[in-house]
Amino acid sequence: MGCYEAYPWYYRTFSSTLSGLLVTAFLFGTLQPAHVTQSQNGYSVRFYGSDTNDGDRVKIPLGLIDSNGRMTTSYPINLVNVFTIEFWMKATASNNNAPACSNGWYTGNIILDRDVFGAGDYGDYGVAICDQRIVVGVSVSSDDRLLIGSTVVTDGLWHHIAITRAESGQIRLFIDGQLDGEVNGAVGRIDYREHRTTSYPNSDPYLVLGAEKHDYPGSRYYSGLLDDLRFSRVVRYTTTFARPTAPHTIDADTVALYRFDEGSGVRIGDSAPGGVNTGELKPRSGGAAQHWSTDTPFSNTDPTSTIAPTATGTNTPTAIVPSPTATGTNTPTAIATTSPTATGTNTPTAIATTSPTATGTNTPTAIATISPTATGTNTPTAIVPSPTATGTNTPTAIVPSPTEISATSPTATYTIVPTASQTPSATSSIGNAPIVPTPHIRVYIPLITYVIGN
């Protein structure tokens, strides 16, 4: 991956001399990588379990990494002790066929790998699918503990997975809010040690999603969808809870949150405060587009409604499409032959020799035996069936003999017609590549250090 040198804090010092007086101003600012913080409902990330050459996975550095592969500064994603890891997954048994993992989680279809090659200075952990069930492993030095779930999760449906680790080392697994297993785990810190030397600089100091990070021969990889992955520095669940119906929230205990809403490209943004735990999608052969799917746990979100004017009402005729629109050059004029007398019980009926047709270039003229009465400030109210002209320039109805309008005269009203604000893309199955989404462009403007001497 190379060397990461993106520091989150910048200091700028400006010094100048004014009339023999040295004036120094210190400006302190914060630079944070651009990241998405919206509720997740657009995309999920798709893994195929197919690439054993550092591809078909997401890699997230655990901190700043120098050219020798040593982590010089730790990021919040480098969990130390207590944590909650939760995410949504959707997979099938035919694509994840690892048998029971009696020897360790690292022999299963690996979903999340925060392993180190050989014995770790502190500890490590991972999550995988073994025998169609979730398994969680946490080790401290040589003390390796394994929690094996009991619920089959490879049924082609979305499942919410939550894993907690307490200060005591106790590990709990929840599937869709139900406690699926617990074990007394090893006690002690499990973070990746700063300045640790390694013979595997391209894999050891990373958290990897969807693959065995070292591509160890014989390893198995996750094939399926992953969405809304949240890391917290507290134990969020100790007993059964309601399966979430909305994306994970962001709070002070959220250390990393991956919405996977980018929909294109290889950058994986962090929605947690600070957004420093940015990852990278490493596509398999064929490019990044195949790894983005519109199939999410929240795909059935109702579309946003917009307002479309439609003439409605009891005994109110509907204007023939298209409705006339008043413009600055064309002014519709209602021409009447007699002065009507409005009554409270009878609805005036327009007698016309032809049906008026409103067009964008022709001025519609409603021919009727009833004179319309102009009401409102510069706003005409045409008596039915003449359609009401709308637009930025309000036309004035010209009438020979306006009379008092009855309280029962029909008027044009508007109703709200829900219109999907976004045409949903064809939902890709977990066996097919998704439609290529429109790329999003983000611009990053770093703050540069300036020092102006005397």
Image (spheres, rainbow, N blue to C red):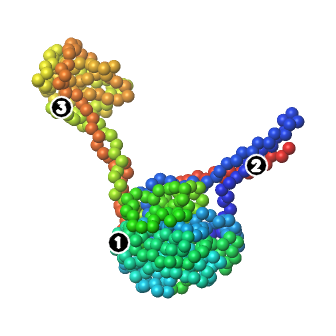
The earlier-in-sequence mark between 3 and 1 is 1
Dot 3 amino acid type: Thr
Dot 2 amino acid type: Tyr
Q: Which x, y percent locates residue 442?
A: 55, 53
Q: Is 338 placed left or right of 259 in the picture? A: left
Q: Is residue 270 above or below residue 208?
A: above
Badge 3: residue crowd in 10 Å (few <14, some 14–19, many ≥20): some
Contact flag, marks 1 and 2 (Cβ < 8 Å): no
The earlier-in-sequence mark between 3 and 2 is 3
Badge 3 is on which residue? 316
Dot 1 amino acid type: Gly
Q: Is residue 446 in view from this perspective?
A: yes
Badge 1 is on which residue? 156
Q: Label 1, secondary structure: give it.
A: loop
Real-space Cα distance between discs 1 and 2? 55 Å
Q: Is residue 231 above or below residue 148?
A: above
The quarter of the picture where residue 355 lies is top left
Viewer-side residue, 274 vs 329: 274
Viewer-side residue, 139 vs 188: 188
State the quadrant of the C terminus: top right
Q: Which x, y percent locates residue 166?
A: 53, 70
* Residue that protrudes farthest toward the top in the picture: 401
Badge 2 is on which residue? 450
Number of dots carrying numbers:
3
Tell me what residue is drawn at x 29 percent, y 36 percent: 309
Q: Of tags 3 and 1, which is closer to the observer? A: 1
Q: Label 2, secondary structure: give it.
A: loop
Q: Which x, y percent locates residue 116?
A: 60, 78
Badge 1: residue crowd in 10 Å (few <14, some 14–19, many ≥20): some
